[in-house]
Image (cartoon, rainbow, N blue to C red):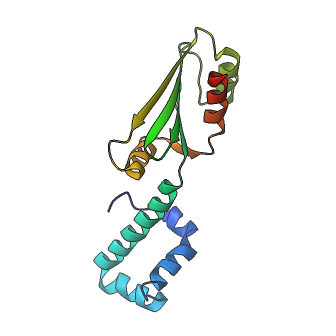
Amino acid sequence: MKYKRLTKEQFEALHQEFITFLATQSIDKAEWDKIKAEKPEVAEQELDVFSDLIWEGVLANANYLEHFSKNHIFLFHCQEKLIQSIVLKSLDTKVDFMAKEGLVWLSDNMFTDDVEMHLGKKEYQEERNKAIFDLITEGAILSDGQLYLQINGIIQS
C-alpha cells in the first residue's frame, strides 16, 4: 500500500465509487460478499488498492495545504516541481491561531514585530504526491488557497 487505507467513514462516503471500482474488476455484490467471507486477505488488498486510487486522485489535484497550530500557520502552494511555503509565527504566546480571535489578531499585527514571517520553496525530494501526503499525515489539510494567495498578494505588493 502506497498511502493509507481510507477510514470506515470515508469508505461509506465513497460507497458508490467503491461499487464502480469493484465492477471494473467484474466483482458484483454477491462475489464481493463471497470474497470477504472466503478470502479476507484478497478483500483487504482490494480495499488497499481502492484507497490508493482515491488518494492518488486527491493528491494529484491538491494545490494548497494549510497547517494551523497555536502559534504557527504553515501555508503551502504545491506546484508541479516544487512546493512554496509561507510560515507565520506569533511571538506573543497568548495568541492562538486555532481560535477565530487569533486570526483577527494576525490581520491586525501581520507586519509588526510580534509576527515572524518566513518564505520558502523546495523542490520535491520524492514523488510530489508522496510529499503532499506526508504533509497531510503531519496535520496539514487541503485548502482552496485563499489564505495563501491573500498573504502572498500582500507580500508581493
Above or below: residue 62 compared with residue 39: above
Image quarter in which the N terminus is found: bottom left
Q: Is residue 153 visible?
A: yes
Q: Is residue 128 left or right of residue 61?
A: left
In percent of the image, x 34 and y 72: which residue is there? 44
Residue 7 seen from this side: no
- Residue 22 lies left or right of residue 101; in this view the side is left
Near-viewer residue (114 or 129): 129
Which residue is painted at 55% across and 69% down in the image? Answer: 14
Q: Is residue 6 above or below residue 89?
A: below
Q: Nearer the viewer, residue 149 or 69?
A: 149
- Looking at the image, which residue sits at the far bottom? 30
Work out which quarter of the rendered image holds the C terminus and state it.
Answer: top right
Report x, y in % for residue 35: 35, 85
Residue at 60 percent of width and 34 percent of height: 148
Residue 45 sits in quarter: bottom left
Count how many numbered circles sit on residues in the image: 0
Task: Report x, y in % for residue 11.
Answer: 50, 67
Which residue is pictured at 67% across the width and 31% down the height? 150
Q: What x and y, as percent, mark residue 149?
A: 64, 35
